[in-house]
Image (spheres, rainbow, N blue to C red):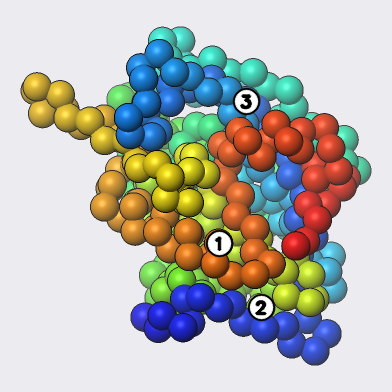
Amino acid sequence: MATEAQANTLPPPATGQAYMDVSALEAGNLRVPLDFIVAGASPSDFITCPSLAFSLRHSKSNTQVVFDMGVRRDLEAYPPNVQSFLNKKIYVNIKQSVAESLFKGGIHPEQIDAVVVSHLHWDHVGDPTPFTKATFVVGEGCRDILTSGYPMNPESTILANSIPMDRARFVTSSEFSISIGPFPHALDYFGDGSMYIVDAPGHLPGHVMILARTSAEGSWILLGGDAAHDYRLITGEKEVAYKVDVLGHVTCAHANKEQAVETIRRMGLLLNIPKVQVLIAHDYTWYEANKDGPAFLPGVIPPL
């Protein structure tokens, strides 16, 4: 467990420190009810937000990594329960798929060495088929969800073929063997301090984030996936939405609210550390300020 002092610092760069060039990728846009995300919102309030994915390039080996795959174009390929949900509550617009965003930025999906998937919800798994050579890296908690996914379980909202199982790497709890900053369980993916896969419980079993260095001088970025759905949750301005109806049915964006709130609290501690950016998949404020700009591939998100 990290001490308070460790939680407010990140490792300094080594001599000749490797880092990751990180670029945003268009991966679909959603219109969602705000009261599903933050407490106290009106049922009539909706937000239009991205489902961001990211391209990461290792500065020394040129290893190409993708974090999340957004929304797939063929919505009819999703399980029936997802299609029903989309028809009733969610509007989807796909400006570019992840594969198309990579092509536009000069990268062929076959060049991708690893795809790290934050979790298995429909708006993050996209279409894995263009990534013919990549290893798919997910948290261990994803295994049971996949093996009981659709069509084996007709009621499931998770496609059993969300990732190719013959190229899947399930990161086990024993591999999350180091702490970094406020996060007690992480994996140094390249073994050189350039990119960490962080265990981020709460939203869905197996949820992970990426914490990557973005310069040799000490800049960082956290790619948070769906650990939080609104940046104001991370700053403490808002609280996670949680409703229980008269029949005892719970509505919450997270499978385990208590774990999610703790993960979000730890994300917020990063805001106290200089030269650290925090980006979540559905950050509509960041997206509006940066869409069509140099933060998207072939450009790079500028290090702080």
Residue 110, horizontal then vertical, whole percent: 79, 47
- What amino acid is at disc 1? Leu
**Element at badge 2?**
loop
Cα distance between the residues tagged 3 and 1: 26 Å
Q: Which mark is residue 127?
A: none
Q: Is residue 31 above or below residue 258?
A: above
- Give the residue pinned by disc 3: 29
* Residue situated in front as seen by the camera: 95 or 99: 95
Residue drawn at x 83%, y 52% as measured from the top left: 300
Q: Which mark is residue 271?
A: 1
- The image quadrant of residue 27 is top right
- Give the residue pinned by disc 2: 193
Q: Is residue 55 left or right of residue 209?
A: right
Nearest to N terminus: mark 2 or mark 3: 3
Nearest to N terminus: mark 2 or mark 1: 2
Residue drawn at x 42%, y 50% as measured from the top left: 236
- What amino acid is at disc 3? Asn
The answer to the question of whether label 2 and label 1 lie on touching residues, with beta carbons closer than 8 A, is no
